[in-house]
Amino acid sequence: QVQLVESGGGLVQPGGSLRLSCVASGFTFSSYWMYWVRQAPGKGLEWVSFINTDGGRTVYGDSVQGRFTISRDNADNTLYLQMSSLKSEDTAVYYCARWSSSGNYDIWGQGTQVTVSS
């Protein structure tokens, strides 16, 4: 069964840190570009970060540049998002997503809630 399972979300104070994980199964994880995407309450989806197959290229959205770090461990089929200097506006459900060869997100995780609040 092809799936992505996120974990690591929670409640954190402004300025704090969290690390999200996304475990992939049912497909060759190392062959796919991967993304983190988030959805804040009442808002649409926002692309957060991208990583290529070997982790050698990463790209970040302007709102998280310099604060978030995406990485992957292909041996463990796991994608990570290290989040630091968190702000209230980072509050959202965070999803990992697989980018298909057809040029779209074709597999999504169930999401993990991140709440930044004092």
Image (tube, helix red, strand yellow):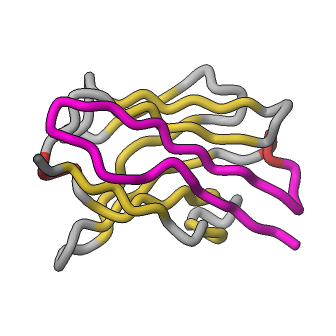
Q: Residue at x 60, y 68 (%)?
A: 108
Q: Point out the residue furthest to the front here.
A: 118
Q: Residue at x 32, y 68 (%)?
A: 45
Relative image position of residue 102 (x, y in whole percent): 66, 66
| Magenta residue check for 57 | no
Q: Residue 49 occupies which quadrant of the picture? A: top left
Q: Is residue 56 above or below residue 17?
A: above
Q: Residue at x 13, y 52 (%)?
A: 89
Q: Is residue 85 above or below residue 24?
A: above
Total marks in image: 0
Horizontally, is 112 left or right of 33 in the view? left
| Magenta residue check for 20 | yes
Relative image position of residue 104 (x, y in whole percent): 56, 67
Relative image position of residue 78 (x, y in whole percent): 71, 41
Residue 101 vs residue 109, the one in the foreground: 109
> Which part of the image, by quadrant, shows the N terminus?
bottom right
Q: Residue at x 47, y 36 (%)?
A: 19
Q: Residue 63 occupies which quadrant of the picture? A: top left
Horizontally, is 62 left or right of 1 in the view? left
Q: Is residue 51 above or below residue 29?
A: above
Horizontally, is 8 left or right of 90 in the view? right
Q: Residue 99 occupies which quadrant of the picture? A: bottom right
The stretch in magenta equals 1-28
Horizontally, is 42 left or right of 28 in the view? left
Q: Point out the residue furthest to the bottom here.
A: 42
Relative image position of residue 3 (x, y in whole percent): 75, 67
